[in-house]
Amino acid sequence: MTDSITTYKIWAPNDAVWTAWAKPVLFANPAYGNSTMEIPEIPEINWITELSGDTMIILDLPGKDGIEESFALAHIGYRPVPLYNGVNGPNPEAMIVNTRDIVIALFEGARILSSINLSPNAPPVFLLDSNRMKGRGKERGKYDNRWCVFPQDMPSADFLANQGIKKIIVHTDENKIQNDLSHILCRYQNQGIKIYLCGGGDEISNIPKETKVPNPSQFGSLMYRFKVIMGLSRNSTGGFGAKIPEQMQRRARRGVYFYRMG
């Protein structure tokens, strides 16, 4: 396993167009115990078979599946860009979102990516974890590392247009677009970029089909980001993740409420 900075630079080289959007959060804390995990497998994909310079891809798949599939796409010329923004907690069993396998795949798979000669201008494949918002939040004793993706986390429609991107393929495991991602895709859609959706497991649903993304609740509202962040746990490193206390007791003193960890 290479060190954190070297590994991050493999995923986000200085000369690549899309490096500015690669999230460093999971590279900052690579510890994952005494793992014996092998180098990630590269699956066969049939929903896309060749590079198209006007196409951007978003893989919204569970755990390490998006990383493994990104290697197959890298072999045909796409640049993987990790957007994982949930912190890797100290205890895998206590984490609401299991990021351990993702961290392992990023570090162990770096040697695969480094062996592929990608152009600095290669079109991107952005990687998301479809489990990012699953699980009960603010659960006592748990490490709340749920996270979401905001429009600021991905390139603007103008930037995509300047790079020649005219369509986006979203590959999911459930054949639907999650709410946070729809806020981003609607902005692209309104600027004339076509959205295609595929996934769900069967052969028919794995054929990309053009789709109309409906405006999500609070689309374009300044309050959207604020309300979402209020429901999550931010970390000092910039990502999402914090330990939820086992118990909190409240007592009043001279009209002021104090909180004490139990």
Image (tube, grey):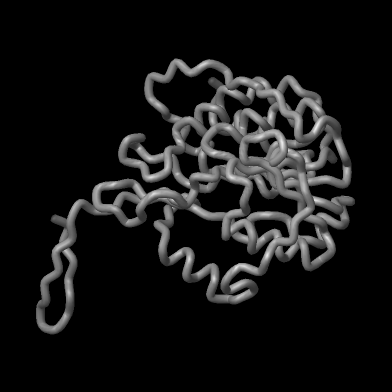
* Residue at screen point 45% across, 44% down: 87
* Residue at screen point 75% across, 46% down: 169
Picture coordinates of residue 195 (x, y %)? 77, 54
Viewer-proximal residue, 220 or 205?
A: 205
Vertical placement of 238 versus 98: above or below?
below
* Residue at screen point 37% across, 45% down: 96
Q: Is residue 238 left or right of residue 81?
A: left
Viewer-proximal residue, 136 or 22?
A: 136
Name the image quarter holding the C terminus. bottom left
Picture coordinates of residue 50 (x, y %)? 85, 31
Name which quarter of the figure residue 3 lies in. top right
Picture coordinates of residue 217 (x, y %)? 57, 71
Q: Is residue 18 left or right of residue 6?
A: right
Residue 138 in sight in this render: yes
Q: Is residue 236 left or right of residue 219?
A: left
* Residue at screen point 30% across, 47% down: 142
Vertical placement of 35 versus 142: above or below?
above
Picture coordinates of residue 243 (x, y %)? 31, 49
Q: How many marks?
A: 0
Residue 127 in sight in this render: no
Q: Residue furthest bottom?
A: 255
Viewer-proximal residue, 13 or 212?
A: 212
